[in-house]
Amino acid sequence: MAKIIIFGLLDSSSLAHFYLKNDTEHEVVAFSISKEYMIGIQKFEGLPVIPFEDVEKELPPKNYRFFAPMSYRKMNRLRADVYRQIKEKEYEVISYVSSTATVAPGTNIGENCFILEKTVIQPFVNIGNNVVIWSGVQVSHHASIDDHVFLGAQSIISGHCKIDSYSFLGMNSAIREGVHVKEGVLVAMSTAITGETEPWSVYKGVPGKKDPISSKNFDA
């Protein structure tokens, strides 16, 4: 059992608190957020909120671990920045894998991953750091997921696929076997990617067609 600090005060942090409390032996002891967002906030879900700038003074890395299960805003770049800052403070960062997920033995899963219920991860899959995999996702055999990726609920990644960093797959999307999803690609909800993609592009439809806008403009 470890004592955990959760970064953030939004829905993803609330969900992380619920899952860690009810599905692990970890103890969540505090939340943390940047000072500029703390005006009038001292507690969240009954636990203290510590300014991130000073967190290592109050809760030192030798005694506490961090978890930062943030959303996909700015194509996962905000979560990536926070993850790097936590590592610079020399904290160990945990991952959460739901007890109802089916994960093949020997699967490599990095730090700060948030893998929710009913996910299926087949053999010979590699998952990097800071990856969010929502409920009911299938990651098929010999697939590779790089750092800072978000996979929406019920999305399907076929065998031998590669998903590069900062990519976002919307719910019910599908990637055909052997396809390489390049860095920063946004795959819209219910879109099927059947061939080559271009970095920092948006794809919509069945089969997926490239949209004129860049995914770098995505700020949801």
Image (tube, grey):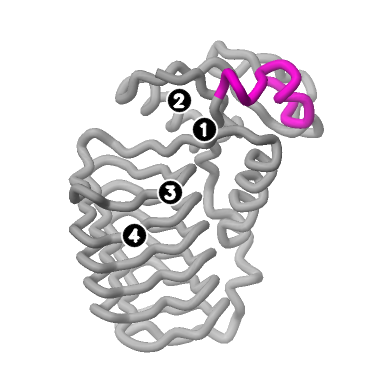
**What is the CA distance from the residue labelled 3 to the residue labelled 1?**
19 Å
* Mark toward the viewer: 3 or 1: 3
Residue at label 3? 110
Q: What amino acid type should be assigned to the residue bearing mark 1? A: Ser
Query: Mark 1 and mark 2 in contact (Cβ < 8 Å)?
Result: yes
Q: What amino acid type should be assigned to the residue bearing mark 2? A: His
User: Quick one: SS at disc 3?
Assistant: loop
For marks 3 and 1 on the same chain, the one whose residue lies earlier in the sequence:
1
Which quadrant holds residue 114?
top left
Note whether 15 is above or below 163 in the view shown: above
**What is the CA distance from the residue labelled 3 to the residue labelled 2?**
20 Å
Note whether 107 is above or below 145 in the view shown: above
User: Quick one: SS at disc 4?
Assistant: strand
Q: Which is nearer the eye, 212 or 30?
A: 30
Within 10 Å of disc 2 (Cα), the crowding (few <14, some 14-19, many 20+) is many
Residue at label 1? 13
Highlighted range, magenta? 50-64
Q: Residue 24 location, x and y as percent?
A: 33, 23
Quadrant of the image containing the C terminus: bottom right
* Image-based side of 14 in relation to 18, left or right: right
Q: What amino acid type should be assigned to the residue bearing mark 3? A: Gly
For marks 1 and 4 on the same chain, the one whose residue lies earlier in the sequence:
1
Residue at label 4? 126
Q: Which is nearer the eye, 86 or 139?
A: 86
* Mark toward the viewer: 3 or 2: 3
Q: Residue 201 location, x and y as percent?
A: 54, 79
Q: Residue at x 78, y 31 (%)?
A: 53
Residue at label 2? 17
